[in-house]
Image (tube, helix red, strand yellow):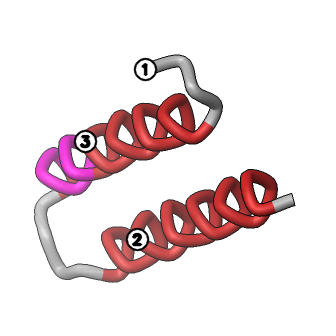
Amino acid sequence: MSILISLLITILVIALVLYLVRMLPLDSNIKNIVQIIVIIIGIISLLRYLAVF
């Protein structure tokens, strides 16, 4: 059950960070790069919770 809660919290944090990045007054290229970095970090953390790493 704790793994499920951790996964849910991680997904919510990723979604919140992506939303906040979209709200920043930055150039669209920089926003895209930051969003890709956040998604990669999110995938790595999700894989860590699933015991792949």
Q: Which residue is mark 3?
A: 37
Q: Which residue is mark 2?
A: 17
Q: Amino acid at mark 1?
A: Phe
From this view, report whether residue 6 is shown above or below residue 16: above
From this view, report whether residue 19 is shown above or below residue 27: below
| Residue range highlighted in magenta | 29-34
Residue 14, horizontal then vertical, whole percent: 49, 61
Crowd class of label 1 (few under 14; some 14 to 19; many from 20; radius 10 Å):
few
Q: In the rendered view, does 50 fall on the left or right side of 28?
A: right
Q: Quadrant of residue 23?
A: bottom left
Q: Residue at x 51, y 70 (%)?
A: 13
Q: Residue at x 38, y 79 (%)?
A: 20
Q: Amino acid at mark 2?
A: Val
Distance CA(mark 1)–CA(mark 3): 19 Å
Q: Which structural element holds mark 2?
A: helix
| Residue sticking out furthest to the top | 52
Residue 33 highlighted magenta (yes or no): yes
Which of discs 1 and 2 lies nearer the camera? The answer is: 1
Q: Quadrant of residue 28?
A: bottom left
Q: Which structural element holds mark 3?
A: helix
Which of discs 1 and 3 lies nearer the camera? The answer is: 1
Residue 8, horizontal then vertical, whole percent: 73, 62
**Residue 53 marker:** 1
Q: Earlier in the sequence, mark 1 or mark 2?
A: 2
